[in-house]
Amino acid sequence: MNTKFKKLALSAGITAALGGFSMPSHAIIEGVAGEALLVPFAIYDSVAVVNTIVELTIPGTVGLDTIPNDFTASHSTPTGSSISDNNTALSVHNNPTPVVTSGVHWYFFDELSNHRLNGGLPVTADDFVQFDWGRVVRAQNSALDGVQGYLVFGTEKARLVGPVPGSHAAADFSFFGDAYLVSQNAILLGALGIVDAKIPVLPMNDGIDAPGQTKVTVDNQVLYKNNLISQVSPLISGMRTVYSDGIPNTVAFDLTLGLRLAPTLQVFWNDHIPAKGYHADVDVFDANENTCSSVLPLPNEVNTIWISQSQQWFLAPAWVDTTTDLCYPNGIASAVLEPGFVRYQIDEEGDTGIGGPEQAAVAFSVLFDVTDANNGIIPVETALGHERGKFF
């Protein structure tokens, strides 16, 4: 059995053993073409032995479909009248002249949204490219070892000066992405060695930046300044966090909580740095509808919460923002073998009453399992956030 199939078999076996608690319903949109892609969490940590791998697919053609054509790749799709037109990718929307070579540009931002590193990737039509964040860190900036943040992938053309001074061009092609949190566990080296959990990848429109534009729109969800990304928000593919009615609202979403015997890493990516003291009121539910309440800080653009029993030796990696037991809805003794979920409630910020999407976020859980008597742990499953909507 090759490594990939071993990895899938292990993950499937552990998921079955844990009771199959990940849920298929979620709030975000993945798997459609985007003119830019957001990977809301990225980390390379040589001490904890975790890494982030991103795989990009550059489609030769993208046909007719509502989401890419209207919301995530509206400036570059459709790119052909039939699937055989596979040389028209990477060409300007409705331009019959094919351009079969171009480039993707990537950007890494830390948890406070500070730009830390960027670079280019040459691509061609129907190409497949693997981006190894750990390899980049080791080769280009070792100071980013152990620094959590996020990645954005866009086109080289979108970085360029646009049709009028002070503007930036629209993207000239669209692409797909998959991302993984990869962990190497020494206990498993003989049988498997490397396992991973999926990180969501969100597609976004990347239209022309108007001179002086400072706010993203549905048509243009990525803004540039001095050839670097200055603002990004997955207004369509993400969880919209502003109802935009001019009235303060509360936003609610659920995140799956694994068995309390093993850690759960919950990630909340926000499209802006919130006001000081920003937090979530959380309610924890177990499998029997018991509940308890707590509060979690969410001060950054990337927020990580490590939920683990304090009496166990599942120490959080150094880059984690918040380490907590949370609370136990029905006591420790009866709750540790039951999965559940955490309901987050956050306040809106930035509602200007425009009647359309203004801000967005991404939330997901990475569920770990115990591998051995020495408390070795590995990520085995990803559960995406479930959006509950807005409340007055």
Image (cartoon, rainbow, N blue to C red):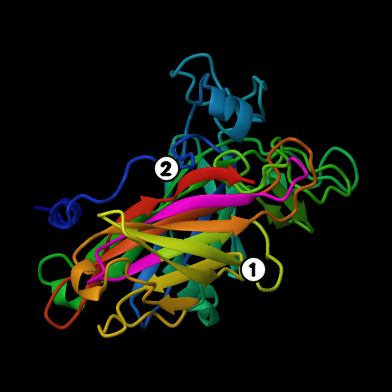
| Residue at the image point whose x is 44% and y is 61% from the top | 283
- Report the residue that reaches farthest toward the top: 81
Q: Say which amino acid is labelled 2.
A: His
**Residue 78's x, y, as percent?**
57, 22
Residue at the spot of label 2: 26
In this rendering, the answer to whether 320 lies above or below 379 is below
Say which element carries label 2.
loop
| Residue at the image point whose x is 62% and y is 26% from the top | 70
Q: Which region of the structure is painted magenta?
A: 245-265
| Residue at the image point whose x is 67% and y is 30% from the top | 75
- Crowding at dot 2, Cα within 10 Å, few <14 / some 14-19 / many 20+, comes out as some
Say which element carries label 1.
loop
In the visual, does 357 lie left or right of 120?
right
**Residue 117's x, y, as percent?**
61, 68
Nearer the observer, 14 or 230: 14
Q: Nearer the viewer, mark 2 or mark 1?
A: 1
In this rendering, the answer to whether 343 lies above or below 163 is below
Residue at the spot of label 1: 278
